Image (spheres, rainbow, N blue to C red):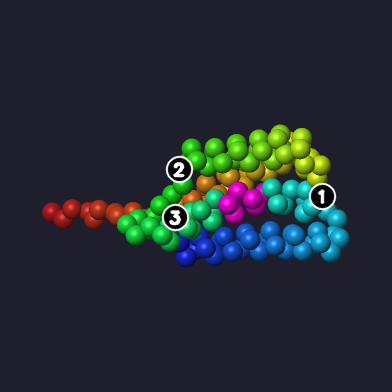
Amino acid sequence: MKTRNLIRAWILIFLVFFFGQILQRVGYSNLFVSGYLDDLVALPLVLGGILIFYRLVSKKNKNLLIPTKHVLVTTLIFSVYFEVIAPQFIPTFTADFFDVVCYCSGSLFFHGVLNKSFELKHVNPKPTL
């Protein structure tokens, strides 16, 4: 994905997050919006922001990608911290298996859609006789 399109997609995801926050602030009660939307968009926002930063500061390679291993480790860190560690020490946090599913889904979305190269594949022309 070209950096310009990546930035546009990241802004769209941020707006989804932002409007979800507004709905919660005005008292809109919906299980998905209040319970899972933040978790679903968290990793695309974080990893997408990192990828945008990498591409903007890279002078040599504007086609950088975040390695799959890094995406998996980030998903694991989010899941363990927010669903195992934080609920033990912060009363407003609750452990929920479906939050982990949302983190994994967001990571899959990031890796499958946003974390893509934009190199054009060159097709060799047919040899002429």
Dot in front, 1 or 3: 3
Residue 100 vertical placement versus 30 (above, below): above
104 with respect to 117 (left or right):
right
Q: Earlier in the sequence, mark 2 or mark 3?
A: 3
What segment carries the magenta color? 40-46
Judge by depth and name the residue closer to the eye, 15 or 88. 88
Q: What residue is drawn where x is 77% and y is 35%?
A: 88
Residue 58: percent from the left, percent from the top? 38, 57
Within 10 Å of disc 1 (Cα), the crowding (few <14, some 14-19, many 20+) is: few
Residue 67: percent from the left, percent from the top? 45, 43
Circle 2 is placed at which residue position?
Answer: 67
Inspect the image, locate mark 1, and give the three-letter code of the amino acid beneath it: Leu
Disc 1 element: helix
Judge by depth and name the residue closer to the eye, 14 or 59. 59
Residue 85 visible in the current orientation: yes
Within 10 Å of disc 3 (Cα), the crowding (few <14, some 14-19, many 20+) is: some
Inspect the image, locate mark 2, and give the three-letter code of the amino acid beneath it: Pro
Circle 3 is placed at which residue position?
Answer: 54
CA gap between label 1 and label 3 equals 35 Å
Which residue of the protein is positioned furthest toward the front in this rendering?
A: 89
